[in-house]
Image: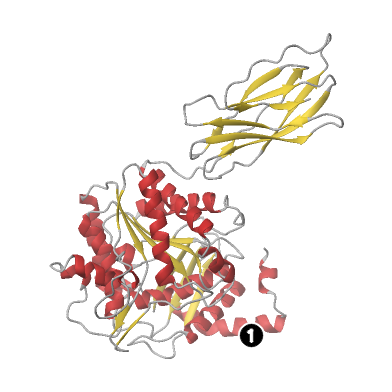
Amino acid sequence: MTLTRLLRCSPGTCFVIASLFAPFQSMADTGSSAANVQHSDAQLDAILTVRAQEILDRMGRLEGQSKDIRVQVIFDFNAGAIQVHFGPGMLPDDYGASFEDQHDAFRHGLTHVAQKAAQVKEITFRYQGREIEAYFPEVRREAEDAQRARERRSQGGHAFVSASHGYYYHHGWRRWALQRDQYHGVQEDFITPQYADELQKWLARRGSGVVTTRPRSLLTEIQHPEAMQPWWQMAARYSVKERFPENPKIWNSKGDRIYPTRDYDEDINSRPLMANHVGAGVALHLHTNGADDTAASGARAVVQPGRPDDLLLGRSILCYMKELIQSAEGYGEFSVGGEPFQVDKGENRLSEMPSIIVEMGFHTNPADAAALQDSVFRTASMKGVEKGYRLFREGKGCLPLKAEPIPGINLSQGDSQQVDVVFEGYPQYPIELVTTNVGCPPGWTCTDGRVHIEALDAKPSQITLRCENAGSAPIFWDTQVVDDDGVKSPPVRHWVQCTRRPGGAVARPAVSTGVEAATAG
């Protein structure tokens, strides 16, 4: 899409937007990366800045934040990098999950606008020109401590699967509350355990002995004695407390400090801290998304900046989520991000192993919300997460299923020939090689072919093509690989030139078990 189409404004409107943008220029210090961006567009930056200011003005304030805060956005569309610069007043008294949640509103809202011009790969935040660690040095210490710890530990086949949110105690309201609002029938606190169940199932079936740990309780019949809600609906912090009462550093990470969202912040921290405690080899945090703009949609992922292994894990999981989701009936156009966002999040920052936040879809988008409640989508998305993690462990990258070109052949009446079908990717066996006729001459009868291959080395990857008609004509076929999960390679078009044999047809050759020849007769 061109920038002109993206702006859709009259000269007067664009002048107003540019005027709004003008006062923000001082937020990016001279000599900073923002000031030296070579591939930004002033009009697009102005639109993003206005959008960011709208988000900020509607946003509830945390303790310590000012009511009047200004923001500036610069988008380097060659690098796919959004830079958000806040003026004075954005910093709260305490750094925690609520502050991180505020940044998600900018990540989702600005990405939705900017990606119409170029793919968004990264979003960074600055506060009066400085990184957050300049104001909260403990954030850097936590990240560095976790990084040093992961360098000393081996990454075994132990997966920590965390379903997001649940009931927590709000010390300001003095009551128990859910962490997310309901949209379009989706309550994130309650739907993510279903996804965790699904992922745990596929990790057990396909994960080569992967052990799974879940931080939230699975008890459905017993209530939490204080919240008076079923244990399975409680936030992880309270279940972790029950399991490890002798280790309060996991579930009481804020110590004696009391502030309104203390338990909310401790819940976020308890997940990676428990993963560290049980020696997990990977942390998979499952979430749904929410945004002010109901048009924001699709699956995304978040990893911690500066951790290359986590980035590879995120790319692998998004790659195979896309492959599995878009192969499921009704979801061929469902959006799945190609690159994980590298954003500081406590769930990832504190993890001493590769860690990823998987965001399956936007509960604020009606179509995504319907998908999130569909068992077909749930199975496909979690198969994709499992496959991405499994291939990451095996050192394999993103390689979607694809068949190589198939050369055309010439056959006489009554002849058949086996043709190799070479493909790349990592299909789930058993697979089938499906050959479909797309061009049969008038008066001929063309029959589709199918080859069943039970395992990787069970038989050669070959199809059988046959001509039986006494005439001469070209026949056109499409062949694709279809795996046990329904993943299909793009069809490969190829041809057979059938020719009349002098003296008539010869005897039909035998065909192997599990092979249906593609026949033109």
Is residue 306 visible to us here? Answer: no
Q: Position of residue 432 (x, y in %)?
A: 57, 35
Q: Determine the residue located farthest toward the right in the rendered image.
A: 442
Q: Is residue 217 above or below residue 390?
A: below
Image side of residue 433 versus residue 265, left or right: right
Asked which colour scheme the image uses, the reply is secondary structure
Image side of residue 15 versus residue 185, left or right: right
Question: What's the amino acid at mark 1?
Answer: Val
Q: Position of residue 28 (x, y in %)?
A: 45, 75
Q: Is residue 72 above or below residue 282?
A: below
Q: Nearer the viewer, residue 449 or 317?
A: 449
Residue at 50 percent across and 42 percent down: it is 399
Residue that badge 1 annotates: 16
Q: Is residue 201 above or below residue 476?
A: below
Image side of residue 253 versus residue 346, left or right: left
Q: Nearer the viewer, residue 486 or 251?
A: 486
- Point out the image quarter for the N terminus: bottom right
Residue at 71 percent across and 80 percent down: it is 11
Q: Position of residue 147 (x, y in %)?
A: 26, 57
Q: Position of residue 271 (x, y in %)?
A: 29, 65
